[in-house]
């Protein structure tokens, strides 16, 4: 089943929802999807491109800061644990991977439990 262009342009209105002050949490939808890699969805939110390279809902494209914040802080709000996770701050739980920008390819640093590995 295929959706017409008008319907395609209105699905997943993430930018519009966030612009109205509603918290948005991005995720991989694991385990029901093929990729558990959060970079896939962060980049998808920034490009809104299909596997064929077609942009759907261009008005809903997010910038890097927005999509990353929704994946981290937005998710901590969604699970009700803002005090412990979702941002990098003293006394918070944090595993961190630093990627090359803008395509998020190749990790340059990895930190687990506060220690660089």
Image (cartoon, rainbow, N blue to C red):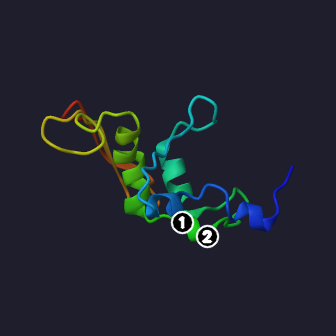
The residue drawn where x is 35% and y is 41% is 77
**Left or right: residue 92 compared with residue 39:** left
| Residue 106, image x, y percentages | 42, 50
**61 in relation to 34, above or below:** below
**Left or right: residue 16 compared with residue 99:** right
The quadrant in which residue 76 appears is top left
Instruction: Check the picture and name the quadrant holding the C terminus.
Output: top left
**15 in relation to 116, above or below:** below
Which residue does the numbered mark 2 point to in the structure image? 58
| Residue 22, image x, y percentages | 44, 53
- In the displayed image of the protein, which residue is found farthest to the left? 90
Which residue does the numbered mark 1 point to in the structure image? 61
Task: Choose between 17 and 101: the one closer to the eye.
Answer: 17
Task: Choose between 49 and 15: the one closer to the eye.
Answer: 15
SS at mark 2 in the image: helix
| Residue 53, image x, y percentages | 69, 64
The quadrant in which residue 8 appears is bottom right
**Left or right: residue 58 compared with residue 6:** left
- In the displayed image of the protein, which residue is found farthest to the right? 1
**Left or right: residue 49 compared with residue 61:** right
SS at mark 1 in the image: loop
Task: Choose between 7 and 95: the one closer to the eye.
Answer: 7
The residue drawn where x is 37% and y is 61% is 65
**33 in relation to 97, above or below:** above
C-beta proximity under 8 Å, tags 1 and 2? yes
């Amino acid at each position: 089943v295929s959706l017409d262009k008008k319907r395609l342009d209105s699905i997943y209105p993430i930018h519009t929802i966030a612009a109205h002050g509603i918290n948005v949490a991005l995720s991989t939808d694991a385990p029901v999807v093929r990729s558990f890699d959060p970079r896939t969805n962060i980049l998808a939110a920034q490009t809104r491109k299909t596997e064929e390279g077609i942009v759907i809902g261009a008005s809903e494209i997010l910038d890097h800061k927005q999509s990353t914040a929704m994946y981290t802080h937005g998710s901590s709000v969604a699970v009700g644990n803002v005090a412990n996770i979702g941002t990098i701050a003293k006394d918070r739980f944090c595993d961190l991977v630093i990627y090359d920008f803008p395509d998020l390819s190749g990790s340059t640093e990895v930190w687990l439990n506060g220690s660089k590995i």
